[in-house]
Amino acid sequence: MKIICSQSELRNNLSLVSRAVPSRPTHPILANVLLMADSEKNTVTLTGFDLSLGMRTSFAAQVEEEGCITIPAKLFNDIVSRLPEGEIIVSFDGDDTDDNPLVAIESMYGKFQLRGVSASEFPDLPAVEKEEALMLPVTALSEGLKGSLFAASNDEAKQILTGIHLTRNLDTLEFAATDGHRLAVVKTTDDKEVSEDGEEETTHDDISVSEEQNFTMTIPARALREVEKILTMAKEEDNVALYVDDGQVVFELGEQNLTSRKLDGAYPNYNQLIPTSFDRTMVVERKRIIESLERVSVLLDQKNNMVKFSLDSQKGQLFLSVEANELGNAKESILAEITGDDFEIGFNIRYLMDGLKALSSNEITFHFNGAIQPVIVTPLSGLQMTYLIMPVKL
Amino acid sequence: MKIICSQSELRNNLSLVSRAVPSRPTHPILANVLLMADSEKNTVTLTGFDLSLGMRTSFAAQVEEEGCITIPAKLFNDIVSRLPEGEIIVSFDGDDTDDNPLVAIESMYGKFQLRGVSASEFPDLPAVEKEEALMLPVTALSEGLKGSLFAASNDEAKQILTGIHLTRNLDTLEFAATDGHRLAVVKTTDDKEVSEDGEEETTHDDISVSEEQNFTMTIPARALREVEKILTMAKEEDNVALYVDDGQVVFELGEQNLTSRKLDGAYPNYNQLIPTSFDRTMVVERKRIIESLERVSVLLDQKNNMVKFSLDSQKGQLFLSVEANELGNAKESILAEITGDDFEIGFNIRYLMDGLKALSSNEITFHFNGAIQPVIVTPLSGLQMTYLIMPVKL
């Protein structure tokens, strides 16, 4: 095998697929990246795969002799990222059946040789029927992920809760995540805009949506965090193709391709948890409340992480306070539009901040019932996001 | 006590003295910062002290009621750095003899109260006779520190080797550091410049230097790293006042003041370790060799950290190579002006890189004798720095 390619192309693509390479592989071969060189198309395809998440990407290269090999991903990445800009030659002698050929990586300054492993040892990415792609607009997908990923559980034991629940219903895509303490739901409606007289207008009717394309499924948050990163490289008007079968999903954007298993099991029926009527509401400036929470959180520690909200509707102020017996205390006030009776309520400050940071609007509304009933936070305008947080007993 | 000051002044000065506050204090009071408010001068003085290193700084403030108190440094710092810009009020009721008053920190948004400790609990900074100051130019001091600090030992058990040895001989200030594996020596001569005909000219004769001001002493590298940071805030033409007595030194720059104990014991007679004649020399571009070393170091690990130099005087090239049996190997070449016979020599790559990074000139000279004799690296021009490194057996 012998390819000649640009250092920057190789570096960018390698760093992308390396994200699917596990740092502690269950099998040594998974620490490697698969490199396939196709002399007919003059392309190089790189694959990283941890048996759950797979990332594959292709780029143009001069393929002088085709072939396949796997190379230790971390070393390969570390070397290529430090090589000078310009042409890089990657090659090995012998054929693809050799078990451990030395793969040469040559730049204008010298030559590295890395011990490779035959491509035949590398597991195949699961095949997914690619008949019907669902086209998801980049903006909808990234808004939905930003508003939900933070609320998924990081505890592998919680299984289905480590995923994002996706529901497509005609032109609406709903993202939901919960770890049991809080719930984030984002609805994105993309192909239509509401005109001034209240009627919906179709703005992009090139993407047709039918009931057959409806789905619900749960995808590991880990895979979607990588999708989120890929999206940062996309243009706003791009679409991501989504292929789904029983066990797997594939996201495709240009030459970039991410395969993930779906999570099995029933996702909680979260819609029934969201209250629909409220005794009190409060509108505040999001940035101001985040800054206040960041300051008073200085006094918190692992034992004590509660912030108290005191709503004063007459003064039109929210008082935030933290008590840390041994260290001291803190109290700040923020202008707020309050409806309903004054009351006090406590929150886990971290859970509260996570949600406030994920909201995108400048002004947000808190919807309260009693001091021990779920609280809903929504943006005053823009994205349709609902953040549900359970209060902490005062 | 009650002071009104600007958030930015308080933040900057607090973050400076906090650097002397130990993260794991041997006594609880040392985790606090001492705040002294002087109503006559309208200044606030902050002090951090870990019994070895002390930092003190003063700034202008409106002192409504004078007094002294100590406040937990980390909390105080974390809070003040998050407060909005503008006026901050720091106050406590009662007098300085109260054991644990609540200290209020007020901004336009609210009020923090921190449990303070009476200033009488805080240890005094050691007194140093401040009769005769030695004035050290900022540029000389920072060049000397940059070229030596990296080579001091981080192993507290090595005592005197955790310091920088400073020698002042008339207008020459010499900085030396060694951890037993390598030695860095920097000579700075500041008040004189060599004119074109080779004679020394006095450019700043306002600073008179006499033999009585000569000294040798060893100062903990930890304290000098803080001096180095203070210097980054100084102007090039500033001078640092240095006061020395038997046990302590004080560095003074404007309102900033750093006190450190000196290290006891005899510093190794390092000058006798530096060879004066050599069999071979090699001139290379510093940036190029650092980049090559960074690339080939990818293949190294804790067991194997050797890079091999092969000098080829006919080709005018230095070949750098690394062998990592299981992983592979690397070889790069660099243009070099070589005098003397070809030969091979091995280095610990980390020790080599540390020295090359501390040198400031673009071209550097390696001076070799045999493959197991000390090697000297010097800049081709500029600062007088000598880096001695012991080779590793091939």
Image (tube, coloured by chain):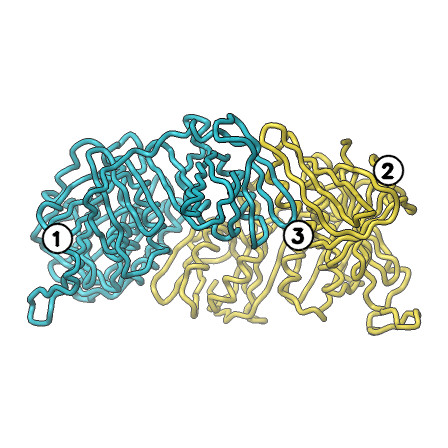
Chain colours: A yellow, B cyan
Pointer 1 with pointer 2, Cβ within 8 A: no
User: With A180 as the anchor, is B15 left or right in this view?
Assistant: left
Could you tell me how far apart the alpha carbons at marks 1 and 2 are, in whole angstroms?
78 Å
> Tag 2, which secondary structure?
loop
Q: Quadrant of the C terminus of chain A?
A: top right
A316 in relation to A304, above or below: below
Percent coordinates x, y for residue B202 in the rendering: 12, 64
The crowd level at tag 3 (other Cα within 10 Å; few <14, some 14-19, many 20+) is: some
Label drawn at residue A370? 2
Q: Residue at x 91, y 47 (%)?
A: A276
The x and y percentages for residue B257 are 33, 45
Q: Is residue A343 above or below residue B236?
A: above
Amino acid type indicated by mark 3: Arg
Q: Which mark is residue B209?
A: 1
Q: Chain of mark 2?
A: A
Co-location on one chain, circles 1 and 2: no
Question: Residue A215's image quarter?
Answer: bottom right
Q: Which mark is residue A225?
A: 3
Left or right: where A123 falls relative to A12: right
